[in-house]
Amino acid sequence: MASLLLRKSGGEDLDVFYPIRPECQADVPKIRFKARAGKTLSARRWHAAFSEDGRLDMAKVLRRIQRGGIHPSIKGLVWEFLLGCYDPNSTFEERNQLRQRRRQQYNAWKTECQSMVPVIGSGKFITAAFLTDDGQPLQDSSTDSDLQDQEWHVNSAVSDKKVLQWMLCLHQIGLDVVRTDRALVFYENEANQSKLWDVLAIYSWVDNDIGYVQGMNDICSPMVILLENEADAFWCYEHAMRRLRENFRTSTTLIGVQSQLITLSEIIKTVNPKLHQHLEELDGGEYLFAFRMLMVLFRREFSFVDALHLWEDSNQVKGLINLMWAMEYNPNIFSLYEDSSSNKSDPPKVHDNKLKQYGKFERKNVKSGQTDNQSALAVFLVASVLETRNKKFLKEAKGLDDVVKILGDITGNLDAKKACDEALKLHKKYLSKTKKT
């Protein structure tokens, strides 16, 4: 059916899956990615990649994704493998058992959260603060429409530090949910907004070390849209956050993406010393202007569809862009996540005949011995954006405000195809130069 849709529509069937509200059509960035019959991973080819008992030929899947991306009808299912939710070498039965265990665990956490805040799971969500910073109930909290509908408000002070920290972030999650992908018809339905709020609220309870930080909504939203079951969406988001959670860790002296910004600085200094020197002279040598791109993986710089495609697989030297998660795929990701006894600091040696199971970007890192996560593809994508605007920075940027403005002009209009092409070239150039030194 998916391939038939592609043939009938000339590949331009994406509006069927991600419809835009009519009043927002003029403001939505142009979609550059097009699914293409014979190149995009279709539902038919996806199902054909499984053996009779359910083992997935990941090398075959990666090749297809890197040629033409993933068809929207199966995108969520494929992401579960790319993000390490499931082992490609597992059977249908093994995955079904794991899925059921995870759904039960999610429901247990949700029940625990509901016992503290009954609005969770009600189809509503909170957008007004209901506690002071020291845990005292706000007298007017019951005037919030969402709370009125539930006839719920806090009657007594909250003294437990973990509970208070969690409750204080719930209204901020709600405010961000209202602003999330609001051009999409999907979020016209309050039940879908509530689903996003529930997932983010429960995750912030489970991972109270990080909690909730603005920008997490941009990462979570596609999972909620792509996976109908709320628990499955949660676990897909949870696995994405295993890669990204340190991006959101902040303190008075540290921002989460600081190590990646340092790496970005080193990359530009190595491949374009003149640009790096110019940015340093503008007091931009710490590259803080690239903070947002790295934190939320270009969700604001691309259209919704192109951002999803960017996350999937990243190589577009000859055809469609092939983007992050397929390019960075490591076949050991499931065991690294599930086996707490595995030695993550000592990666296994990889024989050449096994390299085809790795994504192209990860394969190059394995071959060169680069295992530092701070050299992730996202960093090279940011470097490629800076590099492609090299002349504009050198000619027009007289201060950091100009740098920010130049980058701001690309919001929603960045060409993912060109950015990925340039990112891979920069990665190759950077590895070559660092190897020489």
Image (cartoon, rainbow, N blue to C red):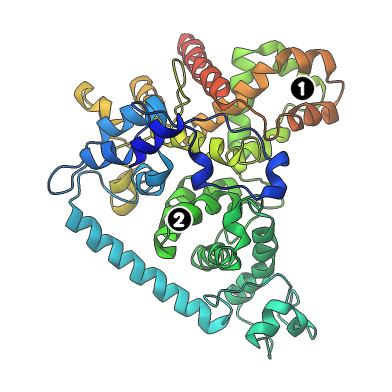
On the image, the x and y values in percent for residue 325 come to 43, 37
**Is 236 left, or right, of 134 in this rendering?**
left
| SS under mark 1 | helix
Q: Amino acid at mark 1?
A: Glu
Measuring 61% from the left and 25% from the top, which residue is drawn there? Answer: 415
| SS under mark 2 | helix
**Is 234 left, or right, of 403 in this rendering?**
left
On the image, the x and y values in percent for residue 176 come to 67, 58
**Is 204 left, or right, of 92 in this rendering?**
right
Q: Residue furthest right?
A: 398
Q: Residue furthest top?
A: 436
Can residue 158 be spotted in the picture? no
Q: Is residue 96 above or below residue 7?
A: below
Quadrant containing the N terminus in the rendered view: top left
Q: Amino acid at mark 2?
A: Glu
The residue where tag 2 is placed is 238
Q: Which mark is residue 280?
A: 1
